[in-house]
Amino acid sequence: MVTLHVNGKAQQVDVPPETPLLWVLRDVLGMTGTKFGCGMALCGACTVHLDGRPTRACITPISAAAQGKVTTIEAIGGDQVGKAVQAAWVDLGVPHCGYCQAGQIMSATALLQQNPKPTDADIDSAMSGNICRCGTYTRIRAAIHRVAQKGATK
Amino acid sequence: MSAPRDSMTSVPRDASSDRPLLLANVSRRTFLTGVGALGGFVLAVGFPAALRAADPPKYGRDGMPDGWVDDPLAFVAIGEDGTVTIVCHRSEMGQGVRTGMPMIVADELEADWKRVRVAQAPGDQKRFGNQDTDGSRSTRHFFEPMRRCGAAARAMLETAAATRWNVPVGEVEAQNHEVVHRASGRRVGYGALAKDAAKLPVPPRETLRLKDPSRFRYIGKGQLKLVDGPNIASGKAQYGIDTRLPGMLYAVVARPPVYGGKVAKYDAAQALKVPGVVRVVEIEGSPPPAEFNPLGGVAVVGRNTWAAIKGREALKIEWADGPNREYDSAAFKATLEASARKPGKVVRNEGDVDAAMASAARRLDAEYYVPHLAHVTMEPPAATARIVNGKCEAWGCIQSPQAARDRIAKRLGLSAENVKVNVTLLGGGFGRKSKPDFMIEAAVLSKAMGGAPVKVTWTREDDLHNSYYHTVSVERLEAGLDAGGKPVAWLHRTVAPSIMSTFNPEAKNEAPFELGMTAINIPFMIPNVRIENPEATAHTRIGWFRSVSNIPHAFAVQSFVAELAAAAGRDPKDFLLELIGPARRIDPRTLGDTWNHGEDPEKYPVDTGRMRRVVETAAREAGWGKALPKGRGQGVAVAYSFVTYVAAVVEAAVNEKGELSIPRVDIAVDCGAQINPDRVRSQLEGACVMGVSLATKEEISFKAGRVVQDNYNAYEVARMAQAPGEIRVHLIPGDFNAPLGGVGEPGVPPIAPALCNAIFAATGKRIRRLPIRDQLMKA
Ligand code: FES
Ligand code: FES
């Protein structure tokens, strides 16, 4: 048994400790908002926050995740910055298929929490680990700037 | 819990039952073309209706399998609380169809969008009309039927209100979710009318009053947000990979690495020792042609996806590779080049190219190469199935749910009535998810597990190793210029394995639908034109990929035009416009194009006036010819595909190290009227990024019959830093009563040539082989 702290809740799971957090979230805990895209930390679809840091759940064993607090897309709206990011995404019509967007939102939220006024270069570097095959990058940039301009409090 | 968590914006039970929605006990008014009787072979992207039968040709929506339906009973439900549920029968993969299609119905219905819910149709083409979501067809084929659905439902509500008030129906009018009696000012809401309206017959099609476009509320306005936006942003949106059923098992499959290969023998002992592994199951493949069939292999079924993946790693499999075991991309490129240098099947011939070449003042030739590509949808293929009491129910991210249904039924030996295919959101499609092989796998595995629900997930490696790839091609262009620099002869040899090879191994020539993608149908002012298509043999599954053969054809043709302009010492944009010539409407058949994207050549001629206009618009908006710093340049290209005209002007910057960036792209699009302008823009933006991605990075290559690339590290795609700094989309206004064009795909073809033309302007280096990758790098 490993005890995980996910979105403010302690959860016991009965899987080997080397199992990646991604599959425990999705298959064991039934939280499918966090997506699988590559399994090798190449695409960012599985991004969650571990103690506030953007983390690729697909390569994070639960033994490591258990050391901290996990926040997923399902709960990021409870954070002011996360909520503002979600609103900007909807408002600017960022998503196409939407599949990458949970990961994009988690990465963007982490960026804005750290750096409320990022430049284009800051955005490119913070978001470079997140692939969007539909090609929504220009709107993602615009949405991040929108949150930065408005501030996260609204 | 008996079904996956239902978060697709509250799908009502009725939407997936067989009960008519708006009212009961009235015979359904449907229009079915009967083409579906041809069977489960649904290659929707390709077959020209005119070639299917001896009947008079059927074009557009009439030519598609199962045609179209405009019955409000199939598409609209109104609850007594006033909630209007509109069924979307096309698959949502990012193009916004679950917003756009219901919006058309809602507008004609005078429904208040805030009170509209969208339900997703299961695969049932007899009931909903064609559901193959590909070929950039949803809006252009269903705009009119969906308008009639909304208008018919509106007429029923108006009749119900007029009857209740005992006034002539001409005195009442539906307005924003109410019916109003003009004289008395009485009004009644849709909810209160629903029961009465449901008792009325559906009015005949001919009696319907469609709105004048000036009175549209939503169509053409672009103010509505995506219906799935909030669910996507909060992680609630449900994709094929997200399906969960009670007692569900999780599977991954080891598939033959070489096309046509099969399992020689395998040993599951170690796999079965992996914690969480439940069973190892061999899936029978089928010999080429693959069609939509699973490739076969060995499946590992586990308690979660990770257990199945670890179990698969522990399998020992010996493969019998079969005849494609030598497939090697480097060698194949040489084969294609050799073919392109020899005459091939002539598919268009005007004037006397050989004589004109012989007497030309200058002759130029060039060969262009585009490798295999993979769609790499962010959501890999994934599907779930279970079998209960002889009935199979499946869930998946599928572009062709009826094909999935028919193929599952055939494979399980069930009738199609006993198979239900539910369509989830698609995490990208791009043509990959038109092929239901992965859904059949889920059904086969459920059967092997005694009907238990099984979800099959493709890993990224699976997706790259066993896709239906975009073809690989060499395009050879030759031209003769006269002393004034005007082209007098044009020879194009296009050589590429055909998509048809996936269905018929004898197919070695490009099909009409492939040639009709920017190769045969160029409307240039050149007196002597010959297009040839030498044979090519496929050694892997070839499939359609967003914009299909337009990618290599437009890359070659539009690059070569710029090469000719340079040779003639002319401005490339002016030279391109001169080649297009004056505005005229050309019957595509006179260009040798019998396909015309399946559309009526009378309604959809090749319109060089529209082609000119997008070039002129993109050039003007981009400030064509403006002074740029050293290392920067502009390039232009145009493509007519999916009956839409798109021109792009790319600004490229190449620094002293040879690193490429793209500060800005201007795109002009004429797709006719735009139903949801914001989604048209977003599709063109996305197509631009995909075009940049395939031009700069993407390549699938084979060695010893196997795909070399495993994951996104080797199959690179554009990331944010490589995306253009700015993408400006310029929409040409259109007429809602004129034929519409496609939107999802036509943005891709002009990007690679416009980019390479811009690189030439910036550096003088001509790129003829994609991807560009490090070709610009200084040592
Ligand atoms: S799935 Fe984790 S980074 Fe791609
Ligand atoms: S929106 Fe489809 S992958 Fe990003």
Image (spheres, coloured by chain):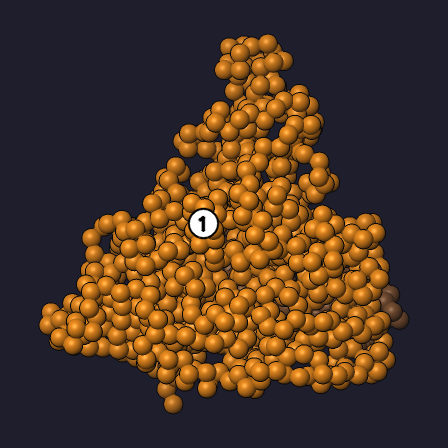
Chain colours: A brown, B orange
Q: Quadrant of residue B336?
A: bottom left
Query: x%, y% of residue B576?
Result: 24, 62
**Subunit of label 1:** B
Query: x%, y% of residue B230?
Result: 63, 49
- Residue at the right extreme, as displayed: A1
Residue A5, above or below B139: below
For the N terminus of chain A, the image quarter is bottom right
**Which residue occupies 66% across, 25% down?**
B198
Query: x%, y% of residue B125?
Result: 61, 46
Amino acid type at mark 1: Ala
Residue B240, above or below B192: below
Circle 1 residue: B54
- Residue at the front extreme, as displayed: B54
**Which residue occupies 73% across, 71% down?**
B283
Q: Secondary structure at mark 1?
A: loop
Residue B689 visible from this viewpoint: no
**Which residue occupies 80% across, 59% down?**
B453
Apparent side of residue B297 relative to residue B639 in the rendered image (left or right):
right
Residue B535 visible from this viewpoint: yes
> In this view of the protein, which residue sits in the foreground, A59 or A82?
A59
Q: Residues within 10 Å of mark 1 (few under 14, many from 20)?
A: few
> In this view of the protein, which residue sits in the foreground, A26 or B551?
B551
Apparent side of residue B304 relative to residue B593 in the rendered image (left or right):
right
Query: x%, y% of residue B167?
Result: 56, 10
> In this view of the protein, which residue sits in the foreground, B314 or B330?
B330
